[in-house]
Image (cartoon, rainbow, N blue to C red):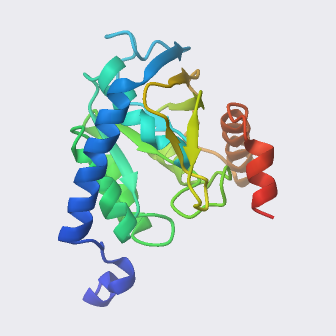
């Protein structure tokens, strides 16, 4: 491999401004999260210490991630975690925000540093850490699953845990995914779904079937799916 393969296209972006913005955002998320009335519907026992042994892959839609760090700290803080963020400046902001909660990050996406990020996630999983993936991020389309999460589950033999988030009162930003920010002191219901296990050896058709299955499970927990789908066309 030559030095040219680590070109601008593969470089991690973000500097002091992004780290500062992300840190401030992280504390905002933490403050708002502390006011939320969270209800957790746990279908796999993740919130019961010692019940789920070994790492898992958290799967959540990109526009739901605002509440997940606070929920993790409130209900299963003992679990180590690594989150995949893009190699862009936006990814640098998210990375800094996650560090406020003690969550490490792997930088990369399907378009930039994807192979490197996958290797870092595999390493983290083998070290016993949970990994968090937004399968429609970082650019969408919204609620359309990209196959990287299935590849990660195959490579690490780690089960996927779909996470659904339902908001009582919420702001929706004017972004590609209508990013959701809950009102302070509002109710948020988080459903931790049953684990999905992906076999290590899959042919092309079986791999595609697992992608469709996980996408269907994730979409089943979305109340604004039709609205968002209409907005994408």
Residue in view at x 45 percent, y 46 percent: 155
Q: Nearer the viewer, residue 99 or 82?
A: 99
Residue projecting furthest to the bottom: 4
Q: Is residue 178 left or right of residue 130?
A: right
Q: Position of residue 196 (x, y in %)?
A: 59, 29
Residue in view at x 55 percent, y 47 percent: 63
Kindly tell me whether residue 76 is visible in this rendering.
Answer: no
- Vertical side of 134 occupied by 175: above or below: below
Q: Is residue 93 left or right of residue 47?
A: left
Residue in view at x 22 percent, y 62 percent: 19
- Quarter the C terminus occupies: bottom right
- Vertical side of 82 occupied by 40: above or below: above
Q: Position of residue 50 (x, y in %)?
A: 32, 10
* Quadrant position of residue 220: top right
Q: Nearer the viewer, residue 113 or 171?
A: 171
- Quarter the N terminus occupies: bottom left
* Quadrant position of residue 48: top left
Q: Position of residue 185 (x, y in %)?
A: 44, 25
Q: Nearer the viewer, residue 42 or 170?
A: 170
Count of residue discs: 0
Kindly tell me whether residue 13 is visible in this rendering.
Answer: yes
- Vertical side of 112 occupied by 140: above or below: above
Q: Position of residue 112 (x, y in %)?
A: 43, 72
* Quadrant position of residue 88: bottom left
């Amino acid at each position: 491999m030559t030095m040219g393969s680590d070109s601008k296209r593969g470089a991690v972006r973000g500097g002091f401004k992004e780290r500062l913005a992300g840190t401030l955002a992280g504390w905002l998320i933490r403050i708002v999260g502390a006011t939320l009335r969270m209800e957790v519907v746990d279908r796999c026992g993740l919130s019961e210490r010692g019940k789920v042994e070994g790492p898992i892959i958290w799967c959540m839609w990109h526009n739901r991630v605002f509440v997940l760090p606070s929920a993790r700290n409130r209900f299963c803080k003992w679990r180590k975690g690594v989150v995949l963020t893009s190699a862009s400046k936006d990814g640098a902001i998210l990375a800094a925000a996650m560090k406020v909660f003690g969550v490490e990050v792997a930088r990369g996406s399907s378009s930039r540093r994807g192979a490197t990020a996958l290797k870092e996630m595999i390493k983290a999983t083998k070290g016993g850490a949970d990994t968090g993936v937004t399968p429609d991020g970082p650019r969408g389309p919204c609620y359309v699953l990209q196959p990287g999460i299935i590849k990660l589950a195959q490579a690490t033999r780690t089960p996927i845990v779909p996470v659904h988030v339902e908001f009582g009162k919420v702001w929706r930003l004017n972004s590609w995914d209508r990013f959701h920010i809950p009102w302070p002191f509002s109710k948020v219901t988080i459903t931790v779904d049953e684990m999905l296990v992906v076999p290590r050896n899959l042919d092309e058709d079986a791999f595609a079937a697992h992608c469709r299955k996980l996408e269907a499970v994730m979409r089943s927990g979305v109340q604004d799916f039709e609205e968002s789908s209409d907005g994408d066309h």
